[in-house]
Each structure stands twice: as structure tokens, then as C-alpha cells.
Amino acid sequence: MSGEELLKIKELKVHYYTAKGIVKAVDNVSLELRKNQFLSIVGESGCGKSTLAHAIPRLVRPPGKIVSGNIFFENKDLLSLSDEDIRKIRGHRIGFVFQDPFTSLDPLERVGDQISEVLIEHLKIEKKDAKERAMELLNEVGLTEDRYNYYPHQLSGGQRQRVAIAIAIALRPSLLIADEPTTALDVMVQSMIMDLLQSLIKKGMSIFFITHDIALASERSDEIAIMYAGKIVEQGQTSRIIAEPMHPYTQGLMAATPDIWERKNVTSIPGNPPDLANPPKGCRFHERCRFAMEICKEKEPPLISLKGRKVACWLYSDENGRDN
Ligand SMILES: Nc1ncnc2c1ncn2[C@@H]1O[C@H](COP(=O)(O)OP(=O)(O)OP(=O)(O)O)[C@@H](O)[C@H]1O
Ligand SMILES: [Mg+2]
């Protein structure tokens, strides 16, 4: 792992063992994240984004299981750490923010005390010092100190999400995983939370951001990885992907994104993502793809490097997986 790399996921498989069968939610995913990088994972509902995010700090719950692969983080192999060691990494080195901060905040406790508690528990500092530090954290996420004494229900959705971010960054993790943190918020508030996440990059953090909104991802991230049916289908520098999306699924996501300036026609991708307990043979996108060829129904396309990104599509690969 090079010095700049923070996270390296290799051939990761995460399955859910359900009555319906084995749901291959993350199927052979490889990804890298460098220090001070903002990476967005983009895809429709049910394509495995949250499962991938939860797998990093080993928070996949039964019936889910990490089946194989590697996750290297700060030069540690997370999948081979003891339960105690992985607990030390959670919060300390890897922070999380989820879609609905109501689920992570205690409704009966003042938000400031919730931040302080994290500091007291993990840093073993005095209550007074923790309170001072919690006030600083509130400032850091754009809230005034008087919010310390508020209960979650007294805050707006955006303010609650700021508190959740303050808790997530309280121990100065190097990686912040944010799983659709702005989905429940209106566009203006969403934009402010995105500004806040971006500001954390300057403070030495890397962001692993999950969204179904390719426009939102394109505004902020350095890199985008497009996920479809448990697999990464295209990945690379945001500017390249947006200027020239190559995978028909990426093209579909972009065509489905409204653009108020260009007033273009918005076209949605026909159909739905497949059932991951029983995915189609070949390319998992072929049933919805307007370019589908015979080979797409039979054989899975390899992820190849082309035009400064990785892409898995038979339009660009020959039988042997070499570039056209
Ligand atoms: N606890 C579970 N038990 C069984 N199957 C699950 C479980 N959690 C997720 N799955 C399945 O795994 C697949 C991926 O789900 P996941 O939640 O990771 O997708 P997602 O991309 O985060 O979707 P969304 O955008 O709706 O949050 C889906 O087919 C889902 O039904
Ligand atoms: Mg999700």
C-alpha cells in the first residue's frame, strides 16, 4: 500500500443468507481511497452501497456476512483484527454518519452531552474538558454553543445531522463514512452539509460518501464509483466520468438527473435493479441496457482500464477482456 493510500478494498464479497436464498449484496468489489480524498459511491436503491459501507468497519449484521476479500486500512488488515481491535478502530479511526440522525442520537439526552460522552468514554478526559471540547466541535460543524443544551427534537433536520457529524468526527478519525447523510434534507441544507463534509478534507480526513444522486456526487467528489447490483461498473476521477460517462448505467443515471439550467429532458432508466438473490447471467445490467449484445447475456464483462477510468462493459472489451 502506497503512503497516500488510506483504504484498500480487495475483491470483497458480502452475502445475506435469507430464506429466499443467498443475496450477493457486494460481489467482488475492489476500491481504493487515498488520504484527503472524497470518494462517492453512486447507485440506485438496493445495489449494495450501504452493505459495502457497513462492511468496512465490520458492522454487517446477520444474516449478512463478509464472505471473502480484504479490507486494508491504515496498513491494517481489518478482516483479521480481533473484535477488540476493530472496536478501537470504529469511532477512533473510522467515523460514520447515516441517513437519519434520529437513529444515532438519543432523543432523551441533550445533544452536547451526547458529544461529551463520546469524548469522556474514549479519551478518558474530565467532564469539564469534554464539555469545552464538545462546544468546539459544535462550532466546527457550524452550530452555536447554545445548541449544547438542546434535545434532538428541538433541532432541525440539518442541525441534527451536524450534531451527528460532530459525534462522528469527535475522535478525529482519518476516514468518515457518510451513508446518504443528506437524503432527508432539503436542497439548501443538503448543500450546506456537503460543504461541511468537504471542509473536513482540509482537516486531514477522507470521505467515503454514499448517494443515489450522481449530480450531488459530481459537485464534491474527487472520485466516483458507480455501483450496480453488487458490483462496481465504472470508477474514476469525477471530472472524467462526468465529461464522458462510458458505462450505459452511468449514462442512464446522468440522463435521469434533472438540470435546471439546460432544461434537458429527463429520462429514467427503464426497469428496476435485479433481485440479488437471483441476478441475471452475464452483465447484470443487460436487461435494462439499450446497447445489450449477445455476449452481455452470457458473460460477465471484466472491469478494464480505459480512458483514465475503470469500466466493466462489453462495449469496450473483447472476449479476452482486452481493450478494443
Ligand atoms: N439485513 C438484510 N437481510 C437480507 N437482505 C438484505 C439485508 N440488508 C440488505 N439486504 C439486501 O442486500 C441488497 C443491498 O442492500 P443495501 O441496503 O446495501 O443497498 P443500498 O444500495 O444501500 O440501497 P438504498 O439506496 O436503498 O439504501 C439488497 O438486495 C437488499 O435487499
Ligand atoms: Mg443504503
Image: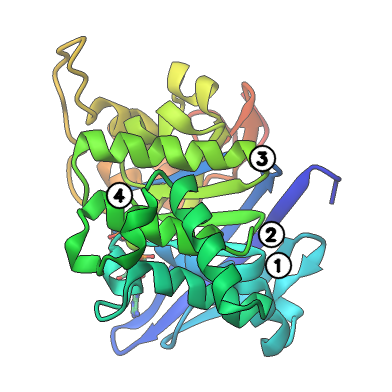
Q: CA distance from mark 2 to mark 1?
A: 5 Å
> Mark 3 near mark 2, Cβ–Cβ under 8 Å?
no
Q: Residues within 10 Å of mark 1 (few under 14, many from 20)?
A: some
276 lies above or below 32:
below
Disc number lying in front (3 or 4): 3
> Mark 4 near mark 1, Cβ–Cβ under 8 Å?
no
55 lies above or below 156:
below
Q: Earlier in the sequence, mark 4 or mark 2?
A: 2
Q: CA distance from mark 3 to mark 1?
A: 22 Å
Location of mark 3 (residue): 36
Kindly tell me whether residue 47 is visible in this rendering: no
243 lies above or below 228:
above
Q: Earlier in the sequence, mark 3 or mark 1?
A: 3
Mark 1 is on which residue type? Asn
- Residue sitting nearer the eye, 166 or 134: 134
Q: Earlier in the sequence, mark 4 or mark 1?
A: 4
Q: Residue at x 52, y 53 (%)?
A: 136
Q: Is residue 271 left or right of residue 55?
A: left
What kind of element bears circle 4?
Answer: loop
Residue 109 falls in which quadrant of the image?
A: bottom left
- Label drawn at residue 44: 4
> Mark 2 near mark 1, Cβ–Cβ under 8 Å?
yes
Residue 228, horizontal then vertical, whole percent:
40, 50
- Label drawn at residue 10: 2
Is the residue indicated by label 4 positioned so its CB lies within 8 Å of ligand 1?
Answer: yes
